[in-house]
Image (cartoon, rainbow, N blue to C red):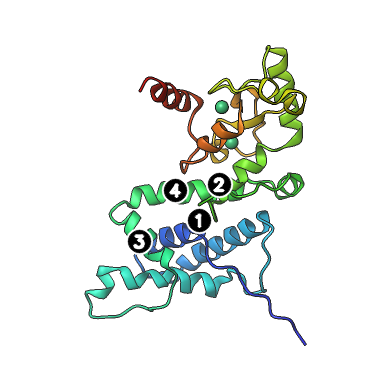
Amino acid sequence: MATSVRNPVWNRDELTLALDLYVKTVGNPTGADFALVDQLSNTLNKMHRLSGVTGAETLRNRNGVYLKVMNFRRFDPAYLNQGKVGMQRGNRLEAVLWAEYDGKARDLAIDAEAITRAVNGADEAKVAKLPPAEPYEGEEGGVIIRLHKRYERDPKLVREKRKAAIEAGSLACEVCGFDFEAAYGKLGSGYIEVHHTRPVHTLKKGAKTKLGDLAVLCANCHRMAHRTPLPLSIDALKQIVLSKEEL
Ligand SMILES: [Zn+2]
Ligand SMILES: [Zn+2]
């Protein structure tokens, strides 16, 4: 008996791309637009492979992608004003994204481009060798951030950055000055987290990460850096910590 594999629910990044395609095809992909549907299908399949997600053979195929794109009709006044009713089934996130990007087609296009670049620019063989990054709270489905965090856990980079920091005199957090060895003694010796200060999707394909693009942060500052949709800069974090102290 064949076992049925369920396909994962559409995540935020995927729906962002679907909504972008909906807007770009003015809510009605026809003819040549199917090349775009196929492109999106390929991108989404790669996104899932990068995340180690498997699904049925139908996973994000042309038909599934088309239906998902058309699902946005149920929010579209241009469609509803014709007295038509869109498909009523869909996930809550679709409504959230529609509201978020309503009247902001440019923001949508920029975000969609960033996601597409992060996925298409990722080297699957290389990513497969990186340690997995556990998702932080509220981060479900953020492929850019997940990739970003996997890149920054690359053991070779971490080793090199730690070495450079020690040679420069200190393994203390660049934002708050926390020093694991000072706080935990031998247990904390040599421990620090490495953070990419440049979001992964801004890097050119195949570009090597420079040590100067990396910062050493304590676990708390690192989490705070990732609390915003795009990682905060070290200066921005320092500012926050400083102004807090002056209160
Ligand atoms: Zn810190
Ligand atoms: Zn980071």
**Gap between marks 3 and 2 measured at Cα:** 20 Å
Q: Which residue is drawn at the image coordinates 60% and 47% (left, top)?
A: 146
- Give residue 13's mark: 1
| Left or right of residue 80: residue 188 | right
Q: Earlier in the sequence, mark 3 or mark 1?
A: 1
Give amino acid for label 3: Trp
Q: Which quarter of the rendered picture does the N terminus lie within?
A: bottom right
Mark 2 = which residue? 144
Instruction: Please give the name of the residue rendered at 44% of the width and 70% of the height, measured from the top-left corner.
Output: 91
User: In the figure, 246 relative to 5: above or below?
Assistant: above
Q: Are marks 4 and 1 in contact (CB under 8 Å)?
A: no
**Which label belongs to residue 111?**
4
Circles 3 and 1: CB atoms closer than 8 Å = no
Q: Which residue is mark 3?
A: 98
What's the distance in space between the residues labelled 4 and 1, CA to CA? Answer: 9 Å
Label 3 with label 2: CB-CB less than 8 Å: no
The quadrant of the rendered image in which ligand 2 is seen is top right
Q: Secondary structure at mark 2?
A: helix
Q: Nearer the viewer, residue 187 or 48?
A: 187
Crowd rating for badge 3 (residues with CA inside 10 Å; few <14, some 14–19, many 20+): some
The image quadrant of residue 44 is bottom right
Q: Residues within 10 Å of mark 2 (few under 14, many from 20)?
A: many
In the picture, measured across the screen, residue 223 lies left or right of residue 23, that is right
Q: Quadrant of residue 240?
A: top left
